[in-house]
Amino acid sequence: MAKFDGIKGQELLDFEKTKDELTLIFKDNRYLFIKVNSGDLVVDLAACNTAKGQELQSVEEGSGEITLIFKDDHKLPVKVQSGQMQVDSIPE
């Protein structure tokens, strides 16, 4: 998907997790914001830590779920248990 082109090929440097938002910080000041409206965001923080330093290869987006696939075939799924997911990539 074109909205993820700005972060593809970038190394994941860090992440920040709150109850309803996950912010992924990539090299070259690029960000991916994953938010949930009126629901719960489910992500494995250990998987986020494992993805640090890895290069993002592709993104798969489905209904209530997004999966980030890194160079070593490491997958980082993010889901919502309820509510609606909103995903924004900066810069686009």
Image: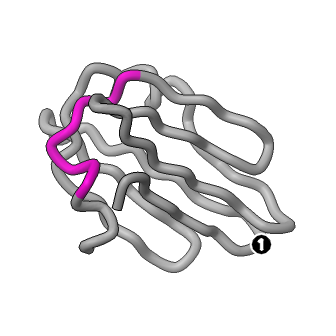
Q: Is residue 9 magenta?
A: yes
Q: Which residue is mark 1?
A: 83
Q: In the rendering, at what x and y percent does residue 4 appear?
A: 30, 61
- Residue 11 occupies quadrant: top left
Spot the residue most to the right. Answer: 38
> If the image is split into quadrants, where does the C terminus sit?
bottom left
**Magenta span covers which residues?**
6-13
Q: Residue at x 48, y 38 (%)?
A: 24
Kind of residue at badge 1: Gly
Q: Residue at x 52, y 52 (%)?
A: 78
Q: Is residue 26 left or right of residue 40?
A: left
Question: In the rendered view, would you say 54 is above or below 42?
Answer: above
Question: In the rendered view, would you say 52 is above or below 9?
Answer: above
> If the image is split into quadrants, where does the N terminus sit?
bottom left
Q: Residue at x 33, y 30 (%)?
A: 12
Q: Residue at x 21, y 56 (%)?
A: 58
Q: Main secondary structure of the magenta part?
A: loop
